[in-house]
Image (tube, helix red, strand yellow):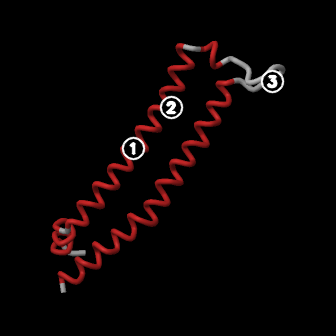
Amino acid sequence: MSSQMYAHIRRNPRFAELVARRTRLAVMLSAVVLVIFYGFVMMVAFAPDIVATRLFEGSNLTVGIALGLFQFVLFWVLTLIYVRRANGEFDDLNKEIVQAAWKETK
């Protein structure tokens, strides 16, 4: 694409909307990941008794193991959320922006 095409894209208000929506989603998902991950690390550091608690009598499964597994599941779900939005909403908006720039260039 030419620099003229890029200029058309940057001037498009929908482009600013796309950037804002993507940034908002990325910041929100990143914040969730950081809070969950560092919350778990802090719990291990400052509340080891809670982390070592068995889920039920006679079980080898502890709260720490369950929370660690929960993190993996949650991070996969957050990735799925981002991929679905990126492949759906963001791609549709991107196509619209590029098509508008092609029309303006011609």
Asked which quadrant contains residue 14, the reply is bottom left
Which residue is pictured at 25% across the width and 64% down the height? 15
Q: Are marks 1 and 3 in contact (CB under 8 Å)?
A: no
Q: Residues within 10 Å of mark 3 (few under 14, many from 20)?
A: few
Q: Secondary structure at mark 2?
A: helix
Q: Amino acid at mark 2?
A: Phe
Which residue is pictured at 22% across the width and 77% down the height? 101
Residue at mark 1: 28
Q: Position of residue 2 (x, y in %)?
A: 20, 75
Q: Secondary structure at mark 1?
A: helix
- Height in image: 80 above or below 47? below
Cα–Cα span, label 1 and label 3: 36 Å
For residue 103, side relative to residue 63 (left or right): left
Which residue is pictured at 75% across the width and 26% down the height? 61
Q: Position of residue 81 (x, y in %)?
A: 50, 54
Q: Secondary structure at mark 3?
A: loop
- Which comes before the other along the chain, label 2 or label 3? 2
Asked which quadrant contains residue 90, the reply is bottom left
Q: Amino acid at mark 1?
A: Met
For residue 37, side relative to residue 57 (left or right): left
Count how many numbered circles sit on residues in the image.
3
Q: Amino acid at mark 3?
A: Ser
Q: Position of residue 77 (x, y in %)?
A: 56, 48
Q: Are marks 2 and 1 in contact (CB under 8 Å)?
A: no
